[in-house]
Every structure is written in structure tokens, then in C-alpha cells.
Image: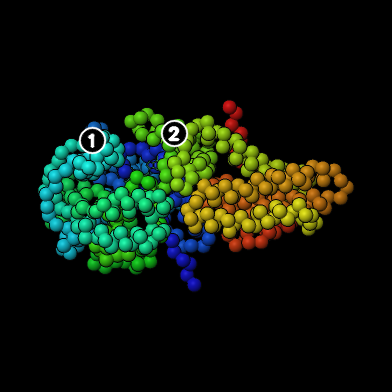
Amino acid sequence: MENKKYYITTAIAYTSGKPHIGNTYEIVLADAIARFKRLEGYDVYFQTGTDEHGEKIELKAKEQGKTPKEFVDEVSSDIKRIWDVMNTSYDKFVRTTDEIHEKEVQKIFKKMYDKGDIYLGEYKGLYCTPCESFWTESQLVDGKCPDCGRDVKEASEEAYFFKLSKYQEKLEKFIEENHKFIQPDSRRNEMLNNFIKPGLQDLCVSRTTFDWGIPVPFDKKHVVYVWLDALTNYITNIGYDVDSPSEEFKKWWPADLHLIGKDIVRFHSIYWPAFLWSLDLELPKQIFGHPWLLTNNDKIGKSRGNAIYADDLVEKYGVDAVRYYVLHEIPFANDGNLTYELLEERYNSDLANILGNLVNRTISMNKKYFDNKVVNSNLKEPVDEDLINTVISAKEKIKACMDELRVSEAIDSVFEIFRRANKYIDETTPWILAKSENKDRLKSVLYNLLESIRIGAVLLSPFLPSTSEEIFKQLNTDKTTYDTINTFGAIEIGKTLNDPKPLFVRIQK
Ligand code: ME8
């Protein structure tokens, strides 16, 4: 039987500037989910990329005296570089300026127009330039844009409209009936009660006030609205075509998960379903609006001068320390906070003390007492049972968390293994066992520790892939797959371990 497929996407980042650690959190979160699915045996396709059109980007390029294309080429490659610095395993990095995408967006627009879902009208409203959004008077907050809090201006233009209102009832019913479609529940309720139930107005899907966009194919003074352009990236890049969708498309669509931030759930759970229905396509299985990362409990913003960048953090602390921090520190439904102080605290307490020390002490003791050889006497004592149970039951627990996208709880459960193993060292005191004539009990104790570390490293691999690799290297084992951790005892007797090497060196304050 073929492996089950799993298609996961992140939002495509705006190429308006270098992504901060909050934007970077999203790709790391998606990476952990994608890697976990691969570990489970899924055939995974993981897509990310950049969103490159729009007035804001056109203006930014102008400020820097560059053409929009020169500007987005630079920013997009910087974003890709940061995704790579974070060791993320995306399968494809897409750009909305790719020809394949631009051509298909034009075909999609035309198909919707021919169908009668897009019509020509006139738009009058209050426009927020940075957000590229029109607002009605009642949507404003203190007279300002409800999304970013900046000034809006009156604007009117001839424009094409998408018949969003036509899909209102169908969408309401769909979301009511499919409880897991939008997660977490707080986001789902917000969409239903604040946006859908009060009524959906037709959506303006073209602009004439700037040029940097995909031209409407049959009316070239208009460019396609950025969100229609951006959202369709999820299908255009896997071989969707309005006339003849490819086999690749049939394989991967519908997406299993669109992972996005909480601020853009509205676009994904209202506009996107309507666009898909207009094209007679199925909806994605799930949209997850993750919480935000704050810095010093404040919203991250370049203009606020508090932006922290992933590559700077990686240079200072290493990639897995940064991955650990963002994955662990942002819970399922609440914003997380980043400060250098907290990061260093977590680094020392969790990575250096709990994980690093465990691995280093165990492998060092095995070197000292058994010359790096894996040995076991199978001498069991009651104290072993709790360790083994904790280690063996972790897999199901972590899988259950990951199925619900509770990633920070999953990583905590991985660390439960390491915590329990440290306690086992205290309980069994190997250095005292080493003093006795007969080393049999010591053999079992060290074996149990090595095996716990191996199982922990398998489960750690989606989150901290390089650390996990390094542990496997020191253990000199190729027992690294998901099915090697169903039972306790796969690490091979007689193998020679590699010399211990500290995984995380404590940070001195
Ligand atoms: O919204 N913490 O792009 P973007 C966590 N181009 N996530 C954050 C964050 C923070 N502090 N700040 C932003 C766009 N994000 C569109 C998407 S998709 C078809 C088009 C998240 O560069 C944000 O929620 O502004 C979004 O999911 C992603 O970073 C990219 O944001």
C-alpha cells in the first residue's frame, strides 16, 4: 500500500523586508510538523515561499531606487536563506513572481469572470495602503485601520468584484459542521461570529492605483488583488490548471494543513474557501492560525525598533537552541514571549542541564567503565520499570499532541524522557555500582540509559534535527526510525560508541 500523503503549507511571506523571528517561528513550526509526519511514514509535501506583489512592495522598491523585481529578488533570497539557516526541510520554495504562478492566476481570474463570479463594478471606500485593504466606516477602530492601526484614506476606483456574498450560507454551514476546519476554536468562533454571520460583502479583487501585480488578462489597466494572487499559490505550484489539472495536483490536493498566523485566518477561512468553490475544488482539510511571538511582551515591528532576527540568534546560540525556544515557548493558543534572558535561561536549564548533561554523563560513564562498548546483563530491578514505561509510552503521547498540533506540549513530552532518565541516574547511582566487584547491575543501568537516550533522540528528531543526529552519531546507531521505538532494547550490544562530546555548552551570564 502506498504511504498516506500529507500536504502542508506555510503562509508565503511578504517580500517587504527581512523576516523577523516571529515570521521565522512559522516555518520552524511547519518544519517540526512536516518532519514528524515523515517520521511517521507519511509521504509529505511541504511548501513555503514569498508573496511579492502589491503597492507596499512597489513603494519600498522605489524608496531604495530599485525596480520592484530587483527588490523582491533580493528580499526573497534573504528569506530563503533564513529558512535554510533554520534547517527547515521544505520541498518547494515558491514565489508569486514565478511565471507558472502568474500565468495560472490569470487563467483563474478569467475562469471566475466567465462563470459570473467576478464582475466589473465601482469601489468606494476607506483604503489602508500597508494592508492593501479596503474598510467600511464601521470596521475602523478609532478611525484607523483595524489591522495595523494606521490612517486610512478615501479611495474610489473602477474595479472587479468577486461574489463573496454568494458563498455566505454555504460557508457558514460548512464551518458550523466541520469543527476542526479552523483551529484553534477561539479563531473559528471569531470567524463565524465576527465576520461570517454579520454578512459577507462582495470582495474587490482588482486594483488600478499601482502596477506591481499580475495584470487582469482581459483588462490590462487592472492588476489582480494580492490576496487572490497569494492564496492561489497553494494550488498553482502543485500543477493546478483550470483546463487540465495535473496528476501531481490530484495527488496532493486538498492540502492537509495551511499553517498561518492568527492575523490572516480571515483571508484563509473566508476568501480562500469561496475562491476554491468558485473553481469547483475541494477545501483544505485544516487551517491552523498559530499565536504570535512577542518580544519583551510587545508586538514585533521593525518600526518599533524591537525586531529580533533568527540569523543573529542562531549565530549566538546555535540553530537548535533557537528552534527549541520558539517551539517550546509558544503554546497552542496563546502568544509566546521572547527575551534574551528567557532564551538563555531555557538554554541552560533544558538544553545544557537536562539533555546535554544526560547524554554527556551517560556516554562518558560508558566510556570509563566499559571502554565505549554497549553491554547489558539484563539484570532487572523494580526501579527500571518506571523508566522503561515512561520512555515507551512517550511515543503515543507525543503523536497525540502532534495530531492536535500541540507542538509545545509534544516537545515537553520528549523532554519528559530526558528528565526521567536523569532521575534514574540519581536513583541508581552508577558511580557507586562501579565500585563493586561485580559490574552486572552497572551494565544494565547504562544500557537502559543509552536506550532511553536513543528513543528520546528519535522522538526529538522532528524538533531538533541536528542535535538528534549528533546523539545518533555518539551512540553509533542506525536504529533511528519510528518503528525502532515500539519496544525497549533495540540499541545493539557489542557496538562501540563514539567519544562523548558536549551537545550544549552552558552560557555564562
Ligand atoms: O501575511 N509571530 O505575510 P507576512 C508569529 N503575505 N507569526 C507572525 C508574527 C509574529 N510576531 N508576525 C507575523 C502575510 N507572523 C501574507 C501571507 S499567505 C497566502 C499570504 C506570521 O510576511 C503571519 O501571521 O506578513 C503570517 O502567517 C506569516 O508570519 C507571514 O507574514
Is 454 positioned to the left or the right of 21 in the image? right
Q: Would you say 151 lies left or right of 489 here?
A: left
Q: Is residue 423 visible?
A: yes
Q: Is residue 495 at all visible to an observer of this figure?
A: no
Q: Position of residue 285 (x, y in %)?
A: 39, 61
**Residue beneath disc 2:** 297
Residue type at the position of mark 2: Asn
**The residue at label 2 has a CB less than 8 Å from ligand 1:** no
Residue at the outermost right position:
437
Instruction: Name the residue at 45% across, 43% down.
Output: 334
Give me the residue at 29% from left, 60% from top.
Answer: 171
Residue 80 lies in quadrant: top left
Q: Position of residue 142 (x, y in %)?
A: 26, 35
Relative image position of residue 141 (x, y in whole percent): 27, 38
Q: Quadrant of ligand 1?
A: top left
Callout 1 secondary element: loop
The amino acid marked with disc number 1 is: Gly
Q: Does residue 85 lie above or below 341 as drawn?
A: below
Residue 204 vs residue 333, the one in the foreground? 333
Depicted 57 relative to depicted 270: above or below: above
Q: Secondary structure at mark 2?
A: loop
Q: x, y percentage for residue 129?
A: 22, 39
Mark 2 neighbour density, 10 Å: few (under 14) some (14–19) many (20 or more): few
Q: Which residue is mark 1?
A: 143
- The number of discs equals 2
Q: Earlier in the sequence, mark 2 or mark 1?
A: 1
